[in-house]
Image: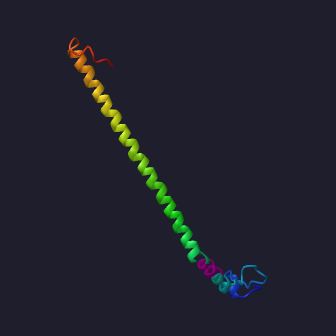
Amino acid sequence: MSGDLSELDGERAEVGDDGGAQQDVAGDVEVVLAELERVLRPAVLLAAEAADELLGAVELHRADVDVVLQHLLLVGHRLELVTQRLQLVRHLHPRRHAAISL
């Protein structure tokens, strides 16, 4: 046999220049910390807060419009009920309420 026992088990010495074998972990940490520092700056946080406030204002306006539309829908339903009642009165008493015209 031409090899020792470690080679028979599948373990062989790696010879070559792997591009990712020597990683710069300290450099990666520095990059992450720099990005974290950039994101946590007061200007960035305040900009995000302003955007949240604007979104909140838009949602409040939308809710306000929704309430107005619901109110108009209720008014429309009430008018429909009044009209139906008047038609019923006209139908039950055609001579008395001839002045009511719809």
Residue 40 at least partly seen? no
Is 98 rendered above or below residue 19?
A: above
Q: Position of residue 86 (x, y in %)?
A: 26, 22
- Residue in the picture at 66% in, 86% down: 26
Q: Nearer the viewer, residue 80 or 98?
A: 98
Left or right, residue 2 beside residue 30: right
Rendered residue at 54%/68% (across/down): 48
Query: Is residue 81 at all visible to an observer of this figure?
Result: yes
Q: Main secondary structure of the magenta part?
A: helix
Residue 54 to residue 45: above or below: above
**Residue 13 in which image quadrant:** bottom right
- Residue lying farthest right? 16
Q: Which residues are magenta?
A: 31-37
State the image quarter where residue 8 is shown.
Answer: bottom right
Q: Residue furthest top?
A: 95
**Residue drawn at 30 percent across, 25 percent down:** 83
Q: Is 30 displayed left or right of 55 in the figure?
A: right
Q: Residue 33: where, in percent of width, then height? A: 61, 81
Camera-nearest residue between 71 and 15: 71
Quadrant where the N terminus sits is bottom right
**Residue 60, image x, y percentages:** 44, 55
| Residue 32 inside the magenta-drawn segment | yes
Q: Quadrant of residue 89?
A: top left
